[in-house]
Each structure stands twice: as C-alpha cells, then as structure tokens.
C-alpha cells in the first residue's frame, strides 16, 4: 500500500509494468523523486496516453480522448462556446496552427488566461490516470527537445490524485496499519510539504503532527470528517511526508522549538538593482506587459531561431543581432522584480536565455545552415490540412457514447444502453453524470445490484460533489428498495443542485402526499 524507497528504486529502474500492480501514483512518485526525464506511455484498452516528464515533472500529456483536447475542455468548463470552438478548430486544422494561437488571435482568450487553462487541462488529464485500476505502461528515454511551456506541481498532483481517487478499501487497509501508532512529519521526505497547498483545516491537522499524534487524537481535534482525514493521511503517507514515529531515528526528529526569525530580504545585485524597472502605475499597461510576456512564453519552446525572432530566412546577421538586443532588453529578468510583475521573473529569464541561444544559432554559419536544412525537411514532411471529421476520426469521444446511451435507454433498450454508458464513464471517470447514468441503468436492468449501484453513486457524489443526478438516482434507488427515510436528504440535495429539473421535487411531493414523511 505504502511503497518503501527501495521499492521505488526498483520501479523506476524497471521501465515497464502493469497499472494493476504499480498504480500510476506510485509510478509517478518513483520517477519524480529521481527526477527522471522521458516519456511514459500508458494504455488501457483503447485508451492511450503519453506523459512527458522533464526532470521528474509532467509537462505534457498526449491522449486519444476527445474531451481532453483543449477546445473540448474549454467548452466543458464554460470558457468557450460551441460555435467559437467549431470555428477555431476548423481554422486551426486548415492552417496547421495550434488551437491556442487561433484563440488568442481571435481575442477569445488572453495569453495569461490561456496559460492557466492549459495548466488546468494538463492537471485534469493527469488526474484521470489516478482512476486507472488496470492497464500497462512503459518508460521511454527522452525523444528530443521538450516544447511544452507547462508544468505541474508534482506534490500537489499526487496528494490531490491519491486523496480523491484512491479506492476506499485501499485507504481503509492502509489506515488500519497506522491505527494506534504515533504519526509524525518525516524530517527527510521525498517531497517538501511546503509545496503542497492544503485548506486551512487540513493544514492545521498536518501542523499538529509535529508533536506526534495517533489517528484517534487527530480525529478528535481536527474537526474533519473521518473519511477526509484518513484519505489525507493516506496520501501524505504514500508520498512519505507523514510516517510513524518508530520509523524515524530519534536523532533526526525535529525538536518542538520556536521557529527561526525571518531572514532579512536579500538585496538585489548592484548591477541588477540599478536596472530595475518599476511596474507601470497604469493597470492597463501592467496587463499589456504581462500579456506580452505570456504570449511569448507560450510559444517559445516550439519556435526555432527564425520564428523566435520573427525573421525571414533571408535576414542578415546584423538584423538578427539587432533583434536579439531588442528582445534581450524586453525580457531582461531584473525588469520584473516589482510586486506587480514578480511572478513573471522565471518566465522572463527563460525567454532571455532563449534569445541568446537563438542568436547564437543564427550567428554561427554552420548552425544557421543546419537550421535551414531542418526547416526544408519539415516543410516537405508537413501533413496536409485536416477536416473536423478527420481530426476526430481517431479520438474516443465519451460525449457521443453517452448521448447514444441516452437514446437507447429512452427507447427501452437498457442492455445496449449500459454498454455505451459504461464506455463513457470509463473514458471520463471524473464526470459524475456519466457515472450516475451507468449506475442507475445497471440498477434498472438488474435491481438485485442495488447496493453496488448505490456505492457507485456515492463515489460519483464524492468525486463530483456538484452532480445532482447522482444524488437523484441514489434517492430513487433507496425509495424503490424501501429505504424511504434515507432517500429524503438525497432527493433534497438533488433538488438544490438541479433547480431546473423537476424530477427531484416531483418525487419529494409524491412521497409527501403518500404520508411517507412530513
């Protein structure tokens, strides 16, 4: 349940394995703790994913699931209309350009917002892998330069993924081994606790582990629900942040001493301090600067030297030098030390160094000629423009499967509907609606499976708390199996979450008229 460091070493060295034996969370811990770079190929039936790691950090996840593409993700989260999505995707395919570039060009999203959306989509694609219970993986060496500007906070991803998607029996089994033992913070964890953002109540609980406490003591003093408490402790134990006191040598245990006084702020180097540019007072100008940096940052890893400088291949060395000096001044990282722009410093530094590398390529005769050859080869190998149908031909689309399942269910063909609902839920296990329809269709087809279906619906509500459909179906199953009193809170919850759907209120009113509750 909780891997040792020796086991993690063997997993990282093996290179291939089964998700059933080595869950994705454990695989990611093993590779990230050792700062491995490369590509992790994962497959589960028809579903395929490729996770690109850079020094142990996931920076890209390629997938054959339609709902995980950028456009579909934006539509699903309300950040893009269906009409704008279709138009932008058509333009992207016809011109051979990235969807993000088209979105920015059409001013449907700003560079900063696009970066955040890309980060959110990457995190969601990776979290999906924490739901896999079977499948195969293999770890391949790096396949070339990483061109993604993204990255995720591995510690945060692991805690969220494990705490949210671990099977309850897995959590219970792991926690059973911790009962009665004093739990402490590991003084030498695999990942620093400081990099994990926790809600205030969870942070308070973790801080209380400094003196060592048993689970029952934590449950009494934390105010957290027992399931939330145990899931958090399990996640932190798996990533080696929390451990039992008997596993920590006494000499390394942190004493309960007062925290050291805050360090004095380190002054900027003299040469940088003299050049610090204060952020413009005008918020619009601040926004313009931020957007300019983010737009450049989103594309610079995919750009070659000519593209980075926005120069034609015929540009002379002198023109390239002038462009380099211009971009060096624009991206000099010491210009972004003011509070309004401080979060851009690291990105500006990367752009600053990329400008130097691009100029070195164009200034060197051999390097320039090699780049020109590479560009000619890329033009000849470039794929022809694709249509919408061609783009989605190889993608698995759970939304289409779900709609087909609804049509079959409405026609009374539950057996066939089940197949489509199961496929949709399997492709997108974070979608509570798909889970709910699958569970209720199973109950409707085989009522003797009521307990299994109720368990699946409760899991759907836990993973997707805003899913009123899961609450409605759970209430209906309880009603139909004679547990009317237990159905009431679920039906009321469904009515709150689904104000435009009359079904929860109709069921409540029907049961009230029958005098089954007041």
Image (cartoon, rainbow, N blue to C red):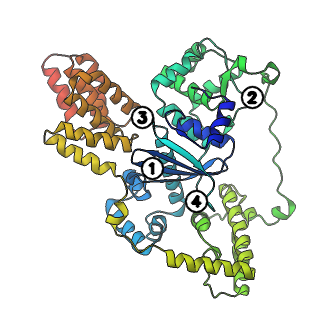
Q: Would residue 196 be seen by someone viewing this image from the given angle?
A: no
First in sequence: mark 3 or mark 2?
A: 2
How many C-alpha atoms fall within 10 Å of the one at disc 4: few (<14), some, or many (≥20)? some
Q: Would residue 244 be seen by someone viewing this image from the given angle?
A: yes
Image position, residue 6 (x, y; %): 69, 31
Q: Nearer the viewer, mark 2 or mark 1?
A: 1
Disc 3 secondary structure class: helix
- Which residue does the image show at 55% across and 35% down from the upper left? 22
- Which residue does the image show at 37% across and 32% down from the upper left? 461
Placement of the N terminus among the 4 image quadrants: top right
Residue topped by disc 4: 148
- Which residue does the image show at 73% across and 63% down from the upper left? 333
Residue 108, by quadrant, is bottom left
First in sequence: mark 1 or mark 4?
A: 1
Residue topped by disc 3: 463
Image position, residue 279 (x, y; %): 68, 63
Residue topped by disc 1: 48
The answer to whether mark 2 and mark 1 are in CB contact below 8 A is no
The answer to whether mark 3 and mark 4 are in CB contact below 8 A is no
Q: CA distance from mark 3 to mark 4?
A: 29 Å
Disc 1 secondary structure class: strand
Image position, residue 30 (x, y; %): 64, 38
Q: Relative to 396, does residue 160 appear above or below in the rendering?
A: above
Placement of the C terminus among the 4 image quadrants: top left
Q: CA distance from mark 3 to mark 2?
A: 32 Å
Q: CA distance from mark 1 to mark 4?
A: 19 Å
Q: Which mark is residue 187?
A: 2
Q: Relative to 489, does residue 369 appear above or below in the rendering?
A: below
How many C-alpha atoms fall within 10 Å of the one at disc 2: few (<14), some, or many (≥20)? some
Q: Nearer the viewer, mark 1 or mark 3?
A: 1
């Amino acid at each position: 349940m909780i891997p040792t460091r020796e086991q993690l070493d063997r997993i990282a060295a093996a290179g291939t394995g089964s998700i059933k034996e080595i869950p994705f969370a454990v695989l990611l811990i093993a590779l990230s703790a050792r700062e491995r770079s490369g590509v992790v190929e994962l497959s589960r039936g028809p579903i395929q994913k490729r996770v690109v790691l850079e020094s142990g950090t996931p920076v890209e996840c390629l997938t054959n699931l339609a709902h995980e593409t950028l456009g579909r993700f934006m539509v699903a989260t309300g950040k893009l209309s269906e009409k704008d999505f279709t138009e932008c995707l058509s333009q992207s395919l016809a011109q051979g350009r990235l969807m993000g570039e088209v979105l920015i060009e059409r001013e449907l999203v700003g560079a900063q917002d696009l970066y955040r959306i890309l980060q959110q989509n990457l995190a969601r694609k990776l979290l999906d892998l924490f739901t896999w219970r079977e499948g195969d993986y293999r770890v391949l060496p790096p396949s070339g330069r990483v061109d993604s500007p993204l990255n995720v906070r591995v510690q945060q991803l692991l805690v969220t993924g494990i705490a949210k998607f671990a099977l309850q029996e897995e959590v219970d089994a792991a926690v059973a081994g911790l009962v009665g033992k004093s739990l402490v913070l590991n003084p030498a964890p695999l990942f620093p606790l400081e990099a994990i953002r926790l809600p205030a109540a969870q942070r308070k609980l973790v801080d209380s582990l400094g003196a060592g406490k048993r689970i029952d003591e934590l449950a009494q003093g934390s105010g957290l629900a027992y399931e939330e408490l145990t899931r958090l402790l399990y996640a932190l134990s798996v990533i080696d942040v929390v451990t039992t006191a008997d596993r920590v040598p006494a000499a390394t245990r942190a004493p309960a001493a007062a925290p050291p006084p805050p360090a004095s702020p380190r002054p900027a180097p003299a040469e940088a301090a003299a050049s610090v540019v204060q952020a413009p007072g005008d918020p619009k100008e601040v926004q313009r600067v931020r957007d300019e940096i983010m737009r450049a940052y989103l594309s610079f890893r995919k750009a070659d030297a000519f593209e980075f400088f926005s120069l034609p291949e015929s540009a002379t060395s002198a023109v390239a030098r002038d462009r380099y000096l211009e971009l060096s001044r624009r991206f000099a990282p010491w210009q972004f030390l003011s509070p309004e722009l401080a979060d851009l410093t690291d990105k500006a530094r990367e752009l600053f160094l990329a400008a130097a590398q691009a100029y070195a390529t164009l200034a060197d005769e051999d390097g320039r000629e090699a780049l020109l050859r590479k560009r000619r080869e890329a033009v000849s190998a470039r794929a022809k423009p694709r249509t919408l149908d061609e783009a989605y031909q190889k993608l698995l689309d759970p939304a289409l499967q779900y709609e087909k399942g609804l049509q079959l269910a409405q026609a009374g063909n539950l057996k066939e509907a089940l197949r489509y609902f199961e496929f949709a839920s399997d492709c997108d296990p974070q979608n509570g609606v798909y889970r709910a329809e699958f569970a209720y269709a199973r109950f409707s087809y085989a009522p003797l499976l009521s307990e299994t279906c109720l368990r699946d619906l409760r899991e759907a509500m836990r993973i997707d708390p805003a899913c009123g459909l899961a609450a409605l179906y759970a209430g209906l199953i309880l009603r139909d199996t004679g547990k009317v009193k237990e159905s009431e809170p679920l039906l009321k919850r469904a009515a709150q979450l689904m104000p435009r759907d009359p079904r929860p209120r109709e069921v409540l009113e029907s049961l009230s008229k029958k005098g089954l509750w007041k």
